[in-house]
């Protein structure tokens, strides 16, 4: 008796399986299984508001797909342009209408696949194609620096051909600017002003990183009648991690390659009134010879501070004229006192070694100076003087961010070697 329920359960399952098998056989025999049927051509079942013939539609006009009559409905719509970008849209609950919810790209070729279903549940398919008109107002993006190998402090720049002010338009632009690296790093864009962005990772780039930068903005609506234009992609690599740290208090520079100390150099930095800027700077370029004049930083000729000197092995770190360079006239003070007008001076041999070992993008940091801190953006690449938290707030994609200027930058000082407004040359 204890086995009776189990027997009845097995018999019930057997009857259920048999019933399902019979049902499946009946369906197969009828030829009406929508899951296995080949989609029919739904050309007569749907219409759309695209251009007639070889015409082009305005990218400002939303795309709309409509089911004809009452004998079927739309089940799915997939719209992509030739670049593989999907067009977002919305299907009505009854399947009678689908419309785009994002702007069409300008000067693009679209392929639209429309899935349908008739009253019997049989699937249909209709493929539509059309082109959009070109936009007369295009936003050009120019990436920097030029391709090549740089130091681990080199930011990526994106210069825009028009000012972008609204948070929504900035988000469209920023979302389309892509930076891909090997190895992978965490990084973000920062809006320096209305038409310039910088990109840097959370920490310095790893040594020997490959960085590829490109834009997906071409044809995308930015705002109003402004659409994205094509941009030339950028590829750069980083070399060894080269860092020079100058201690203005001890009057020595310590140089590291990939974290290992490789040289210690006696130096002199800015004297009182011309103190060298503190903070992280990035090498901007190198000039074998520069004629440095005191008049370039506002020192009148004939004054006790006036100078007019030929300078060799000059490695530039600010646009206002701060260099690491040979200063044979101050060798007696190097390692003991600060006597320059803002530059970091060293012997000719040491300057030649520095010049030959450092490249654009390498890191030059000054500590324990009486000068102001290097500004983030208006005098070279001071990007690393912003914390990662402050850097993220410069992104249009950061929650709640709305900014047009840098609140973290210190105010400009009076004209001296610490000023960032002019482009003087200090020895």
Image (cartoon, helix red, strand yellow):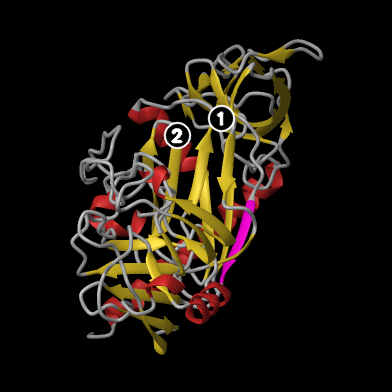
Numbered badge on residue 316: none
Q: Residue at x 39, y 75 (%)?
A: 244
- The rendered magenta stretch, by its main secondary structure, is classed as strand
Identify the secondary structure beneath mark 2. Answer: helix
Q: Is residue 58 magenta?
A: no
Looking at the image, do the residues carrying marks 1 and 2 touch, with CB atoms under 8 Å apart?
A: yes
User: Percent from the top left, x then y, of residue 380?
Assistant: 42, 51
Look at the picture and state if 368 lies above or below 178: below
User: Percent from the top left, x then y, of residue 361?
Assistant: 49, 63
Look at the picture and state if 76 lies above or below 320: above
Q: Nearer the viewer, residue 34 or 151?
A: 151
Q: Which residue is mark 1?
A: 220
Q: Nearer the viewer, residue 377 or 252?
A: 252
Q: Quadrant of residue 220?
A: top right
Q: Which residue is mark 2?
A: 172
Crowd class of label 1 (few under 14; some 14 to 19; many from 20; radius 10 Å): many
User: What range of the chain is rendered magenta?
Assistant: 234-238
């Amino acid at each position: 008796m204890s086995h009776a329920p189990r027997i009845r359960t097995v018999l019930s399952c057997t009857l259920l399986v048999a019933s399902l098998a019979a049902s499946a056989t009946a369906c197969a025999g009828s030829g009406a299984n929508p899951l296995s049927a080949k989609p029919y051509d739904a050309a007569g079942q749907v219409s759309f508001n695209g251009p007639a013939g070889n015409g082009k539609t305005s990218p400002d006009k939303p795309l709309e797909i409509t089911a004809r009559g009452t004998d079927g409905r739309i089940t799915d719509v997939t719209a992509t342009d030739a670049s593989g970008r999907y067009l977002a849209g919305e299907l009505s609950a009854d399947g009678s209408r689908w419309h785009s919810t994002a702007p069409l790209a300008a000067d693009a070729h679209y392929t639209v696949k429309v899935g349908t279903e008739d009253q019997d549940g049989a699937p249909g398919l209709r493929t539509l194609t059309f082109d959009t008109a070109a936009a007369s107002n295009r936003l050009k993006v120019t990436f920097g620096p030029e391709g090549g190998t740089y130091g681990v402090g080199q930011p990526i720049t994106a210069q825009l051909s028009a000012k972008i002010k609204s948070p929504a338009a900035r988000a469209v632009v920023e979302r389309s600017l892509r930076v891909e690296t090997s190895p992978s790093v965490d990084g973000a864009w920062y809006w320096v002003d209305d038409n310039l962005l910088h990109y840097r990772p959370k920490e310095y780039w790893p040594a020997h990183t490959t960085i590829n930068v490109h834009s997906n903005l071409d044809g995308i609506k930015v705002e109003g009648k402004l659409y994205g234009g094509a941009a030339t992609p950028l590829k750069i690599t980083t070399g060894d991690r080269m860092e020079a740290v100058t201690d203005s208090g001890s009057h020595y520079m310590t140089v590291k390659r990939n974290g290992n100390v490789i040289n210690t150099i006696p130096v002199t930095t800015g004297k009182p009134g011309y103190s060298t800027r503190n903070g992280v700077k990035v090498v901007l370029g190198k000039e074998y010879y520069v004629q440095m004049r005191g008049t370039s930083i506002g020192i009148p000729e004939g004054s006790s501070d006036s100078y007019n000197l030929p300078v060799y092995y000059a490695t530039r770190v600010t646009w206002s004229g701060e260099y690491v360079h040979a200063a044979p006239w101050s060798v007696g003070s190097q390692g003991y006192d600060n006597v320059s007008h803002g530059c970091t001076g060293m012997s000719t041999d040491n300057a030649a070694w520095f010049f030959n070992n450092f490249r654009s993008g390498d890191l030059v940091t000054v500590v324990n100076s009486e000068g102001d801190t290097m500004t983030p953006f208006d005098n070279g690449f001071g990007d690393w003087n912003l914390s990662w938290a402050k850097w993220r707030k410069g992104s249009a994609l950061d929650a709640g961010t709305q900014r047009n200027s840098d609140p973290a930058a210190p105010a400009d000082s009076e004209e001296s070697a610490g000023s960032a407004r002019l482009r003087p040359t200090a020895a």
